[in-house]
Amino acid sequence: MIKKLDNKNKEIATEILSIQISSYLVEAKIIDYYDLPPLRDTTDSLQECEETFFAYYLKEKICGIISFKLDETEIDLHRLIVSPEYFRKGVAQKLLDFVETIEGIKSMRTTTGAKNTPAVNFYLKNGFFKLQEVKIDEHLTLSSFRKILSN
């Protein structure tokens, strides 16, 4: 089941942060870069952010979270995080599929670490195409992706 989350609620923001940290630590290990901005988030910064959050629940437990900002008819995905114990169980796919059904959306964009092969492959498999790569510093390069929706 997918439900909207109120990230302004401190308890919910704390739960989001817990899943986010565990998920992004896996990415940090994959790309060998531990200074990722999501790892610097706090409960307060999550409460203050202007993203829309949805969670995938299994037996009343949050397994994954997606957040985005809507820019007219384009969704800018900010987070697609899955609790590591639910990796490779289709949680990210369910969340992405859900967001793609939002009425009036014509495209989606997102960014991930260029060395994050699982994420890059996930987006490519789901019809995203690479827009560009931007070198942030000698240790981190980000890949940006876009998907045009047919709905």
Image (cartoon, rainbow, N blue to C red):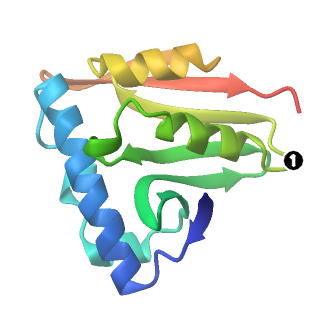
Asked if residue 63 lies left or right of residue 27, the reply is: right
The image quadrant of residue 76 is top right
Q: Secondary structure at mark 1?
A: loop
Q: Residue at x 42, y 19 (%)?
A: 120
The C terminus: image quadrant: top right
- Going by the numbered disc 1, the residue's amino acid type is Gly
For image coordinates 80% across by 43% down, the residue present is 105
Q: Nearer the viewer, residue 139 or 33?
A: 33
Q: Residue at x 19, y 36 (%)?
A: 26
Residue 75 seen in the figure: yes
Q: Position of residue 91 (x, y in %)?
A: 49, 41
Where does the image place residue 98, in percent across and percent down from the top left? 68, 45
Q: Which residue is mark 1?
A: 104
Tell me the quarter of the image containing the N terminus.
bottom right
**Looking at the picture, how far across and down is residue 133, in whole percent?**
40, 17
Q: Tell me if 38 is positioned left or right of 137 in this view.
A: right
Location of residue 142 with respect to 15 vertically, above or below: above
Depicted 122 relative to depicted 82: above or below? above
| Residue drawn at x 36%, y 85% as measured from the top left | 10
Q: Bin the neighbour count of mark 1 within 10 Å (Cα to Cα): few under 14, some 14-19, many 20 and up.
A: few
Q: Nearer the viewer, residue 121 or 69?
A: 121
Give the total number of marks visible in the rendering: 1
